[in-house]
């Protein structure tokens, strides 16, 4: 997932994406605990993608607050 792709999305779309990534993280953690996880790098990717989405959401929130303050 690219940060530039995320910046094109609306905050609602970003929140939906974050929920999806959190569910994916849970499922991957569950697979790891039961020994069914085949690719451990998926956990790292999901965690980083979620962090990326949170960063973009915070940027958008800060930008909106700055516009209202003007």
Image: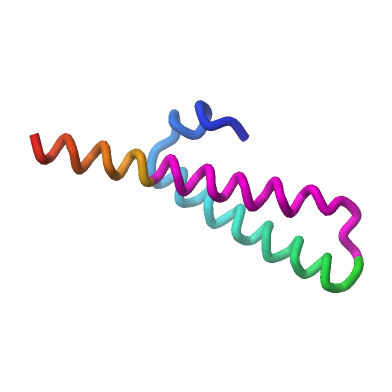
Residue 47, magenta (yes or no): yes
Q: Is residue 36 left or right of residue 10?
A: right
Image quarter hosting the C terminus: top left
Q: Image quarter for residue 19?
A: bottom right
| Left or right: 30 in relation to 23 | right
Q: Quadrant of residue 38?
A: bottom right
Q: What kind of colouring is applied to the model shown?
A: rainbow
Residue 56 spot, x, y in % from top left: 43, 40
Q: Residue at x 91, y 68 (%)?
A: 35
In the image, residue 56 lies in the stretch drawn in magenta: yes
**Main secondary structure type of the part rendered in magenta:** helix
Name the quarter where the N terminus is drawn.
top right
Residue 68 lies, with reference to residue 32, above or below; the image says above
Tell me: 66 left or right of 53: left
Which region of the structure is painted magenta? 36-57
Q: Nearer the viewer, residue 8 or 51?
A: 51
The answer to whether 69 is drawn above or below residue 3 in the figure is: below
Which residue appears farthest toward the left when viewing the image?
A: 70
Where is residue 58 shown, x and y percent of the image? 37, 46
Return the x and y of residue 22 as percentages of the image width and height. 60, 59
Q: Nearer the viewer, residue 17 or 50?
A: 50
Query: Residue drawn at (83%, 72%), measured in percent from left and top?
Result: 33
Q: Nearer the viewer, residue 27 or 41?
A: 41
Furthest residue to the bottom? 34
Image location of residue 9, percent across then percent down: 44, 34
State the residue at coordinates (83%, 53%). Answer: 40
Q: Is residue 9 above or below residue 27?
A: above
**Horizontal side, residue 46 vs residue 3: left or right:** right
- Total number of numbered discs in the rendering: 0
């Amino acid at each position: 997932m690219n940060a530039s792709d995320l910046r094109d999305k609306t905050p609602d779309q970003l929140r939906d994406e974050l929920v999806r990534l959190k569910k994916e993280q849970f499922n991957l953690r569950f697979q790891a605990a039961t020994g069914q996880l085949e690719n451990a790098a998926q956990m790292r990717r999901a965690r980083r993608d979620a962090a990326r989405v949170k960063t973009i959401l915070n940027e958008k929130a800060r930008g909106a607050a700055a516009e209202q303050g003007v």
